[in-house]
Amino acid sequence: MDSRYIATVNYTGRTLDSGFVFDSNTDPAFNHMQPYPVNLAELGGVILGWSDALQQMKKGTKATIFIPSSLGYGENGNGEKIKPNAILIFDMDIVDAATEEEYLAKQQQMQEEMLRKSSELSDPKNKDTKQPEKK
C-alpha cells in the first residue's frame, strides 16, 4: 500500500518486555471493537512503525510487527501503559485497503443503508398488520 490508501486494521498492541497488552480493538475490555482506519497520507496519524509496516502490507495481510522505540513512543513513552524506550509488538490484520475515494464511497453507502433501515423501522406502513388466522 502507498499513501493513496486507507487501511482498515484490527490490532492488539503489547510491550516486548512484559507482554502487557496496552490496547486492542479486538478485545472487548478496551471498549472500542471497530476496525481502525489509517489514512496513509496523514503524517502523524499513527506512530511511524505503523506507517512503515502498513506500506509493506495489503488487504488480507496478518502480521506480527516489532516496533523499536525510535519508531514508537521513544524516550517519552505514552502514559503509564507504555514506558520510555519501550519496544512494541502489534498483531495486525488488514481487513480492508481502499483509496480515499473508495473508502468514502463505502462509508456513504453504509450510512445510507443505516438510514434506510431506520426509516423502515419507524414507518407504520411497514408494520405487519395481518391478523392471526382463526382455527
Image: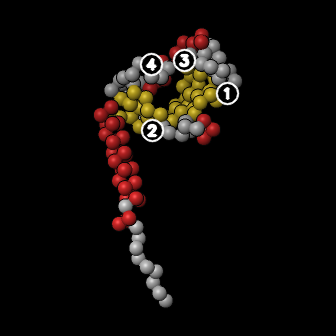
Picture residue at 37% right of the left edge, 45% below the top: 111
Position above or below: 54 against 103: above
Q: Earlier in the sequence, mark 4 or mark 1?
A: 1
- For the residue labelled by badge 2, is the local secondary structure a helix, a strand or a loop? strand
Instruction: From the image, tell me which residue sits under label 4.
Output: 44
User: Where is residue 91 shown, x and y percent of the image?
Assistant: 56, 31
> Which residue lies at the image location 45% right of the left edge and 84% below the top edge?
133
Q: CA distance from mark 4 to mark 3?
A: 11 Å
Closer to the camera: disc 4 or disc 3?
Answer: 4
| Marked residue nearer the N-terminal end (1 or 3) | 1
Q: Earlier in the sequence, mark 4 or mark 3?
A: 4
Query: Disc 4 versus disc 1: distance between alpha carbons?
Result: 24 Å
Badge 3, how many Cα within 10 Å: few under 14, some, many 20+? many
The spot of residue 66 in percent (x, y) is 56, 22
As measured in the structure, the alpha-carbon distance from the residue carrying label 3 to the one carrying label 2 is 23 Å
| N-term-proximal mark, 4 vs 2 | 4
Q: Which mark is residue 72?
A: 3
Q: Quadrant of the N terminus?
A: top left
Mark 4 or mark 2, which is nearer to you?
A: 4
Where does residue 71 sit, x and y in percent of width and height? Answer: 52, 15
Where residue 102 sits in the image (x, y, percent)?
31, 37
Residue that badge 1 annotates: 20
Residue at image mark 2: 95
